[in-house]
Image (cartoon, rainbow, N blue to C red):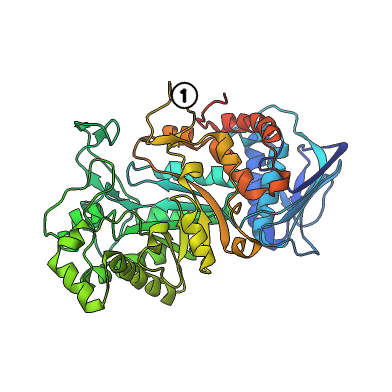
Amino acid sequence: MILPLPQHLVSDSAHFTLDAQTSIQTLPSAEQTAQFLAEHLRKSTGFPVPLVKDRQGKTICFGWSAEDLGPEGYHLTVTKDQVVLEASREAGFFHAAIGLLQLFPPEVFSPSVKECDWTIPAVHIEDRPRFAWRGFMLDVSRHFMPVSFIKTVLDLLALHKMNVFHWHLTDDQGWRIEIQKYPQLTEIGAWRKNTLIGHGHDHPKVFDDVPHGGFYTQAEIRELVEYARVRHITIVPEVDLPGHMQAAIAAYPELGNTGQKLEVCNFWGVIEHVLNPSEATLKFLEDVLTEVMDLFPSPYICIGGDECVKKEWRESAFAQQRMQELGLQNEEELQSFMVGRMDTFLHQHGRKLLGWDEILEGGLAPHATVLSWRGEKGGIQAARAGHDVVMVPQEHLYLDHYQSSDRAGEPLAIGGCNTLEKVYQYNPVGWATPEEARFVLGTQANLWTEYVKTPEHAQYMMFPRLCALSEMAWTDPEKQDLADFMIRLKVHLKRLDVLGIQYRPLE
């Protein structure tokens, strides 16, 4: 009943029982994962589960594979006398440990000791992921989420063998990352006076009277990056530019085009206030990204690049003069110029620029990777031009959409309908030739939080759809079976129950 489904699994009638004499035989390169596994087993079983160098009776053993299993592949073998986890890399050991935990009763995920029969079936598993990029994006700009919940998200991604947490940290409605060189980004930009009630399309607009805000200190970010590293998850930060920047402009009006003193935005939608294209603004962005790179070791830094309204540039004498000086034909090329400068800057520092598919308009930066969200068209265009892509089409993988066509009883959402089945059945390379598919790094689901105010609501929107995403991204298509997935999901939801996760019940 493992989820996501392993690529190859054979079971027999024997069983292994964990007891007070069971130890974990580890090796130096697997000690971090061995400790992670031991702590989980100790908390729920109450057994000592010591780490040992030599086999002692009934043992869980870590060992290097003689064959190269790839960066995340593993073998897991359970007999009546021992459990053997084999891998070629540390991430493989970690995924093997997650698979082993899922063989136990759901109570193994309890934070306190449970009376339980800790017996698991004998199996042999050979496993590795379908895609290298298996991600989830969480927007914390529209509604701030506490550090404790970010840790919960990371734990849940690890449980589902997902390896990318895309963290949307800035937008019009709030700036959530401490930048020491520009303290007003959080002193002013992290707080809005109130928030829209109801849908963004409703008229007249009605607001509550509750100030909203918060941000993550650099110390908190470093703690979360390390927490993710132990779970073999890369945190990809996003600082959205040159649009979606009203919070930054509220903090530093000189970044805007009009000189107007703005407030942090308190409603939803595509906002017309964008950064000006001056050298001073580009220097500001480089300063911000310098601190971002210092905090996040991720190879990828997301600069957004989506929904940049060009109205202010068309009306700005400075922006028009700048276009003339740079020999640019239109405002789309001006946006590409700004994105291109960030691409060059990141590339010079050994990083890769990631952006939403609007960065294709006006010319794609030479080192850019594209998040294809407005359908598959952007991903197809980028792949055919030889650029890496991550497929995230909103009509399949946006978790801010409703989970059922029957909206009665569902919390307010932005619109659309992405069911559990629809997520599971999406194929990120269904359009691609083998040559084009080489450029598809993988896929992720996105949760924007305009209408998601609390961690509990976020969990409801994430699950069980993120379970479907995890199997779609991990398991080879020929082994995917929706009916079988639904059977295993019912067992898996018991694990989420033990963890206290608020998911949408199955219909």
Image quadrant where one finds the C terminus: top right
The residue located at (65%, 52%) in the rendering is: 94
Q: Is residue 26 visible?
A: yes
Q: Quadrant of residue 144?
A: top left
Could you say where residue 280 lies in the image, as x and y percent from the top left?
21, 71
Residue 30 vertical placement versus 118 (above, below): below
Q: Residue furthest right?
A: 13
Image quadrant where one finds the N terminus: top right
- Give the amino acid at mark 1: Asp
Most foreground residue, 369 or 380? 380
Q: Is residue 464 visible?
A: no
Residue 376 vertical placement versus 43 (above, below): below
Could you say where residue 52 lies in the image, as x and y percent from the top left?
74, 53
Most foreground residue, 370 or 454? 370
Residue named by callout 1: 406
Q: Quadrant of residue 429?
A: bottom right
The residue located at (23%, 46%) in the rendering is: 191
Secondary structure, mark 1, is: loop
